[in-house]
Amino acid sequence: MNEEKPQPSPIAAENSERVRIPKDVAAEVDRLIREGLAISAIKQLRATGLGLASSKVYVDSRIERLARPKVSCPYCGKNLKSAKAKQCFECCMDWHDPKNICRLG
C-alpha cells in the first residue's frame, strides 16, 4: 500500500510530546480552518484519537500559521520564511544591505 508519512504537529498539550497527524487528516483540518470551521477541525482531530487539549493546540497553531502573510522572494518568487526576511533560502540571495545584494554559498 502507498502509506503517506504523517505530518509533524505542534507539541501536544497533554504530554509535552510531538504527535503525528496523517497528511490526509492535516489537509482536511487545514481546509476546515480556512473555511472558518475551527470546531469542526478539532472534532476531526478528536476522531483520530487525539486528545481535546492536543487538538486545540494543533488547530490554534495551524490558524496562526495559515494567517501569516505569504511574502515572495523578489529574485526567485519562492515563499520567504517571514515578512521581514532579507534572505531567501531557496535561491540563496541576500539583500540585508541594499547596496550590496549578493548570492550566498
Image (spheres, rainbow, N blue to C red):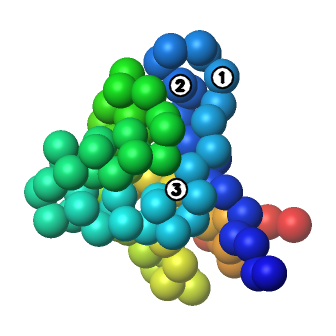
Q: Which amino acid type corresponds to the residue marked 3 in the rendered image?
A: Lys
Q: Say if 44 sits above or below 78 in the image.
A: above
Disc 1 from disc 2: Cα separation? 5 Å
Q: Which amino acid type corresponds to the residue marked 1 in the rendered image?
A: Glu
Which callout, 2 or 3, points to the residue nearer the camera? 2
Please give the name of the residue rendered at 79% of the width and 66% of the height, measured from the top-left corner: 104
Disc 2 from disc 3: Cα separation? 24 Å
Q: Which quarter of the image is occupied by the C terminus?
A: bottom right
Q: Observer-nearest residue: 14 or 46?
A: 46
Residue 12, disc: 2
**Image side of residue 39 versus residue 31, left or right:** left
Please give the name of the residue rendered at 35% of the width and 26% of the height, measured from the top-left corner: 52
Q: Farthest residue toward the top? A: 15
Residue 17, disc: 1
Q: Say if 47 sits above or below 54 in the image.
A: below
Disc 1 from disc 3: Cα separation? 25 Å
The secondary structure type at the circle numbered 2 is loop
Q: Observer-nearest residue: 100 or 91?
A: 91
Q: Which amino acid type corresponds to the residue marked 2 in the rendered image?
A: Ala
The secondary structure type at the circle numbered 3 is loop
Residue 96 falls in image quadrant: bottom right
Residue 95 falls in image quadrant: bottom right
Using a 10 Å C-alpha cutoff, classify the residue at mark 3 as few (fewer than 14 neighbours), some (14 to 19) or many (20 or more).
some
Which callout, 1 or 3, points to the residue nearer the camera? 1
Q: Where is mark 3, residue-wise?
A: 81
The x and y percentages for residue 70 are 35, 66
**Image side of residue 16 versus residue 69, left or right:** right
Residue 90, disc: none
The secondary structure type at the circle numbered 1 is loop
